[in-house]
Amino acid sequence: MTSFEPSFIRAIRFDHGMVRALRAIGTGRGQQDLFRERAPELLEHLRRRSMIESTESSNRLEGITVPAAVLRHLVRDNANPVEGDRPQGEIAGYRNVLNLIHESSDVMAPSPNLLLQMHRDLFKFSGGTGGRWKAADNLITQTAPDGTVFVRFKPTPAWQTPEAVDRLHQGFASELDGGPADPLVLIALYVLDFLCIHPFADGNGRMARLLTVLLLYRHGYEVAKWISIEQLYERTKDSYYDTLYQSSQGWHESRHDPLPWVSYFLSVIQAAYFDLEFRLGDLNTSHGVKKQLVLDAIERAGDSFRIGDIENAVPTVGRDHIRNVLREQRQAGHLRCEEKGRYARWRKT
């Protein structure tokens, strides 16, 4: 009932694709200091955007949505949700826990008590069973196109959950201290086992994604600060759910194959580092960084904006450079100029 049995971990065999992914992720991790040194302002823009994208995607994977303007107000402005509005409460709870991870991951060692505290905060605004292990058995189900509901997996029974969570953390800590596996592989196995235990009555998927970000931070992989891992999951959600399903089969008897999930997990982290490098542009000159700052400001602006709005958003970029980027975007068909002159207004197409 765990992926952290020493004999089980030592039997895992990596394919060449996973080895390449680990190598590429290591390269991305090694560039983080360079990114911080040469593009601090752009990284701050990416951090703010990632907060919104992560909160939106993780909740949307669970069918929780709010209008875009409400989402931005809740996350960017740290606003309180409307009392009694459950979707807003779910969004605000996720925002709070994600902010806590961004600010305090170094003192958030994974433990059963930490999981309970994070779950309590996740449900701070929406009531329910926040901060308590499940009191009844639960099932992971799927609805077929014809409406038929079938069971994908039977998690750990409720009465065994506290013991299973304890065993998960003991095994994880033991392998981190002296095991042969790479920490990224151990993080993937931790997430898999957490979802197989399914320790809460609600919120397990969101908790798993928050724990992923936390564990990446704690092991030096800061890409989740600037690129939304949750959004990458959502973009590839068929693979996300399929690999979890494949790797969970036989888990109770320790006969499961974790490689489909581990391989997918590594591919997502690799994609995040590739995305980060792409968004930062050419760090050998300031041109690529400034252009990306302007593009990021345009993306965050409303459907219609003035050049002054972009200047206020990126005060370190000159008006001539902003105009050049706007012209490029117009030629590419992404923008059109509705009013010309000093106070020209632009609209997204």
Image (cartoon, rainbow, N blue to C red):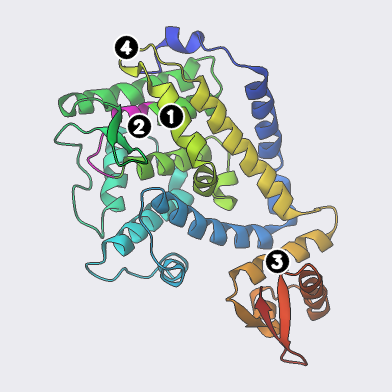
Residue drawn at x 35%, y 18% as measured from the top left: 251
Judging by the rendered image, the residue that carries numbered circle 2 is 195
Q: Earlier in the sequence, mark 4 or mark 1?
A: 1
Q: Residues within 10 Å of mark 4 (few under 14, many from 20)?
A: few
Residue drawn at x 61%, y 60% as measured from the top left: 44
Determine whether label 1 and label 2 are within 8 Å by CB: yes
For the residue labelled by badge 1, is the local secondary structure a helix, a strand or a loop?
A: helix
Q: Which residue type does callout 1 highlight?
A: Leu
Residue drawn at x 44%, y 55% as measured from the top left: 55
Q: Of 312 and 152, which appears nearest the observer?
A: 152
Mark pair 1, 3: CA separation: 36 Å
Determine whether label 1 and label 3 are within 8 Å by CB: no
Q: Any mark on residue 253, and which?
A: 4
> Percent x, y for residue 73?
43, 71
Q: Of 48 and 134, which appears nearest the observer?
A: 134
Q: Any mark on residue 295, and which?
A: 3
> Percent x, y for residue 112?
29, 33
Is 198 covered by the magenta stretch? yes
Q: Is residue 107 something that shows in the picture? A: no
Q: Is residue 94 left or right of residue 299?
A: left
Q: Earlier in the sequence, mark 2 or mark 3?
A: 2
Mark pair 1, 2: CA separation: 9 Å
For the residue labelled by badge 4, is the local secondary structure a helix, a strand or a loop?
A: helix
